[in-house]
Amino acid sequence: MTPRIEKLNEKKLIGMRLRMSLSNNRTGELWKSFIPRKREIQNNLTGDVISMQVYSPTHFANFDPATEFEKWATVEVSDFEIIPKEMETFPLTGGMYAVFDYTGLSSDPGIFRYIFGTWLPKSDYKLDDRPHFEILGAKYKNNDPASEEEIWIPIRPKSE
């Protein structure tokens, strides 16, 4: 699987977040609290939702499934004028990303083993310290092997 390389402009996101780890995965809890309230966000730019992870700079260098990170359930918005109660803003910094078009179960870690264990080490890129995210569009179906999503991994040239 070969990704496309994209230069992302800054995005404005509104959503909710929880701290979690891979060994204490609270993704279901996060989305169960966000999805019923998503319609309260009035200035969405698309119908897509964005699942975003914010890791510490050393998260992957010292990988441990118990290390916590922030997970966000968000939508992209035109501005931060109206923010529903108990939701937060996140300005997603632009930059270079490797974008993988993935079909399959979101619970299957195989795609991430491929990205970090095979593709990235053989590529001309290294991880950049910016959020990772998935765009869950119209073809995304939770727990369905035919589900489609885009996986965005922040990268920069190895020569930097």
Image: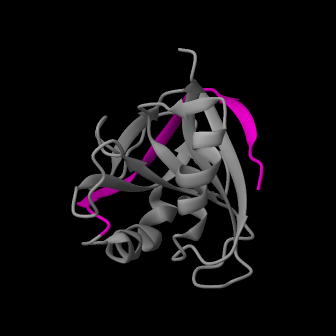
Q: Which residues are magenta?
A: 1-22
Camera-nearest residue between 42 and 106: 106
**What secondary structure is the stretch in magenta mostly built from?**
strand
- On the image, the x and y values in percent for residue 128 come to 47, 30
x then y, percent, for residue 17:
31, 56
Q: Position of residue 50 (x, y in %)?
A: 54, 54
**Left or right: 107 as drawn, with respect to 84:** right
Q: Residue at x 54, y 53 (%)?
A: 117
Please state if 9 lies on the left or on the right of 148 as rendered.
Answer: left
In the foreground, 140 or 37: 140
* As drawn, 27 above or below 160: below
| Location of residue 33 by image quarter | bottom left
Residue 11: say if magenta.
yes
Q: Nearer the viewer, residue 80 or 72?
A: 72
Locate residue 25, reporting x and y percent.
Answer: 31, 72
Give the answer, above or below, for where 148 lies relative to 141: above
Residue at the (40%, 38%) spot, across then down: 90
Mark yes or no: residue 42 visible.
Answer: no
Picture quadrant where residue 72 is located: bottom left
Screen quadrant of the N terminus: bottom right
- Colour setup of the view: one colour
As drawn, 88 above or below 114:
above
Asked whether, in this view, residue 31 is left or right of residue 157, the answer is left
User: Residue at image x 31%, y 34%?
Assistant: 57
Q: Residue at x 67, y 51 (%)?
A: 46
Residue 30 shows in the view: yes
- Extreme residue in the top direction: 160
Given residues 151 and 42, the one toward you in this image is: 151
